[in-house]
Amino acid sequence: MTHFLLRRLAGFIATLWVASVLVFAALELLPGTAAQVRLGETASPEAVAALEARLGLDRPAPLRYAEWITGLARGRTALSSSYDTPTAELIAERLQVSLPLAVLAMALTTAMALALGLYAAAHHRRLGDVGVMAASQVGMAVPSFWFAILLILLFSVRLEWFNAGGFPGWTDADSGAVTAASLWEGLLALVLPAASLAVVQAAILARVTRSAVLEVMREDFVRTARAKGVGRGAVLWRHVLRNAMIPVLTVMGLQFANLVAGTVVIENVFVLPGLGRLVFQAIGNRDLVVVRDVVMLLAASVVVINAGVDLLYAVLDPRLRTVGEP
Amino acid sequence: MSSFRQRALRHPSFALGAVLVLLLIGAAALSLAWSPYPPAAIDVPHKLAGPSAAHWLGTDSLGRDIASQILVGSQNSMAVGLIAVGIGMLVGVSLGLLAAARRGWVEALVMRASDFSIAFPALLTAILLAALHGPGLLTATAAIGIFNIPWFARIARAAAHDVWSRDYVLAARAAGKGAWRITRDHVLPNIAAVLIVQATIQFAVAILAEAALSYLGLGTQPPQPSWGRMLSEAQTLMFQAPWLAVWPGLAIALSVLGLNLLGDGLRDLLDPRLARSR
């Protein structure tokens, strides 16, 4: 078990390192330096050189890379050029929107996908199965941002149940304190965005759940359990679902990367002040420090989640702890 | 071959997918020669008109004909899809074949690299590229193409492995054929079907990604019409003209649905073993 954990840890650190080198190198390739970008093309070479010296850009790239990484590790980040605040502060503020949104979307995705997948598998080759599969085919084809716009048209423009966008914050506007009412308001603002992310993701995950469950249901131990008198529902929940979770978790891990990307798009649809809008505005302002740190954070979160999925495999299936490769 | 055609016509998802994909290709081809109006033709007196005989799907905030924009916008989706899948296939399949032929550290390196890049969303690549070179169709297509590479590399390697373990490859090796000639003569022809199926699915992914990037302003730039950008323009007029948001989204969804169904159908038809187990 220790060997397994050590190997996974080494792989995890190596992946993070490669990601950081790639992100750093990508922005190093910039034609002209960050200082040139900030001052514009008409700036005099002296002004550019002065700003470069002030920002420390005249020093060699490996040194700046090392500073960036050690800074990230200690939570000390560079100043954003358009906000003049450390990027860590900006990111922490925006995470208050993006993180709850991602969690809510993933929870909705999982709930919908498991329910639909199990239902379809239990009704294999019958009307319910065909219906779920057809719906998921449509769900996979619908762009999440279009679905978001349709949700706004229905629930905000026509029914007026939700706001068409924006985020009221988690605190009360008058007192600045966190109250039950202010939390509820904040949550309401995230319902439509999370739903538009979840429906598309759940369409894929429901298919995976269905085929994984069908696969397990053919196993001998399921027949044995049924033969010794365990009820259909109990077999599905206790024996089938647990064994079907490996492929489902794999796809959930892969989907997390999509979710991160989807959040960037959906935050722009609903004008939510999250990481997606931050990085997007940073491109507009050519605020490369913010782009670099946000992209690194998003990439790191994908790596962390995938490492977590790897560990969950071992929890779910003890055989994998000794074999190594799932 | 005739039995293949009969099976294909009787396969519901293949048939429906093929019809939708033919519609997409037909729309793109037709728009090269003809569209009801020039897509950029401004006609302010008739702005935000509903569907009518003159403007089948209505007009936008500048009086431009929606049907013409959708028709011409299909060129964009087709072009991005073709180029992005082309990049992914060329580089990815080469890497996959190399990995399967060489094994050892080459294979380990290719597989690690593709595991890593599969987790890196096309959108993040596009954001990095846009921050570097400014937003545009070229950077968007490149980002989607790069995103496609690991998928093709994985599929090609797995399928090629299977071929390499066959007896006829062993026979070819015993006869003195080198890795390169075995790959060209035996491996590639035998994995072509799998690659075609994957290409269909990645094409759908590319259309979705192009639409999302153009919606964000990171893809197609004006005045070239694109489905994604039409949606972002429609969103600003949601209260005055809600129908504007319907047509471009429908065009994207039907194209993607068609490609996905076609891919599923092709997989069933080309590999009957899989069809039975599903």
Image (cartoon, rainbow, N blue to C red):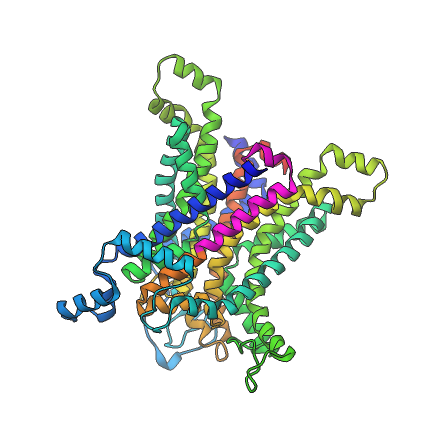
Residue B230 in view (yes/no): no
Who is closer to the viewer here, B206 or A181? A181
Q: Is A322 part of what is drawn in magenta?
A: yes
Q: Which residues are magenta?
A: A299-326
Quarter of the image with the N terminus of chain A is: top right
Q: Residue furthest right?
A: A229
Residue B85 drawn in magenta = no
Residue A105 spot, x, y in % from top left? 58, 61
B213 versus A237 height, above or below: below
Position of A210 with respect to A11 (left or right) is right
Task: Measuring from the top left, give residue A324's x and y in whole percent.
Answer: 55, 34
- Residue B209 seen in render: yes
Residue drawn 54% across and 31% down? B3
* Depicted A148 relative to depicted B101: above or below: below
Along the viewing direction, whichever of A183 and B75 lies nearer the viewer: A183
Decide: is B163 above or below A256: above
Image point (29%, 59%), residue name: B132
Please state the horizontal and vertical placement of residue B17, each as a whole percent of the image: 52, 48
Q: Quadrant of the C terminus of chain A?
A: top right
Q: What residue is at 50 percent from the left and 30 percent from the top?
A: B1
